[in-house]
Image (spheres, rainbow, N blue to C red):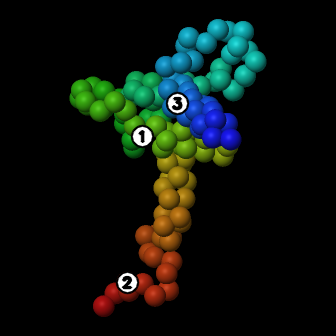
Amino acid sequence: MIFYLSLLAALALLIMLGYHYRSVILPHVPTKVRSMFPGLNHYTPLSTFSGQAQAGLSSSMFDIEANMRDGDSRAGLDERGTQEVLEIMRRERVDFDQARLIRHNQILARNGIDPSGMPLDSKAVTRL
C-alpha cells in the first residue's frame, strides 16, 4: 500500500514539475506529440516587455514601449495578470485599457470595494 502511495506522490510531483517548467519543456516535445494536444500549441509565455507589447498589452495610458526605451530592468509584467487581461480582451472583445479596468474592478469587488473606491461593508467608517 505504501508503495502505491509513494508511486502516486512521485507521479503527482512529476506532473506538477512538468506544468511549472512547461515553457522550457515544450520546445523539446516532438510535433507529433504536440499535435495530439492542441492546447499546447497556443502556449507562448509573455515574459518580456517586447513580447507583451507585441501581444497588444500597451496603450497611450499604459506605455510599455516607454519602459523598453528607458531600459527598465524588470523582466516584464506579472504573468498571471497579463493572462487575465488577455482572457478578458478575448472574451469581452474590448481593448487593453478597458480590460485592465474590468480586471481592476473584479479585484476590488473580491476585496469588498465598489468601483468608486468605497467599501461595501456597511460597518466601515468612511468619515468622522
Identity, as a three-letter code, of the amino acid under mark 1: Asp
Residue drawn 72% across the image and 9% down it: 32
Q: In which quarter of the image is the C terminus?
A: bottom left
Q: Name the residue beneath numbered marker 2.
A: 126
For discs 1 and 2, the disc positioned in front in the rendered view: 1
State the image coordinates of residue 61 (x, y, percent, origin top left). 39, 43
Secondary structure at numbered mark 2: loop
Secondary structure at numbered mark 3: helix
Identity, as a three-letter code, of the amino acid under mark 3: Leu
State the image coordinates of residue 72 (x, y, percent, origin top left). 26, 31
Marks 1 and 3 sit apart, C-alpha to C-alpha, by 20 Å
State the image coordinates of residue 122 (x, y, percent, origin top left). 50, 86
Residue drawn 42% across the image and 28% down it: 47
Q: Name the residue beneath numbered marker 3.
A: 17
Marks 1 and 2 sit apart, C-alpha to C-alpha, by 32 Å
Q: Is residue 52 above or below residue 61?
A: above
Between residue 75 and residue 16, name the one nearer to us: 16
For discs 1 and 3, the disc positioned in front in the rendered view: 3
Residue drawn 76% across the image and 18% down it: 36
Q: How crowded is mark 1: few (under 14 residues within 10 Å), some or many (20 or more)?
A: few
Identity, as a three-letter code, of the amino acid under mark 2: Thr
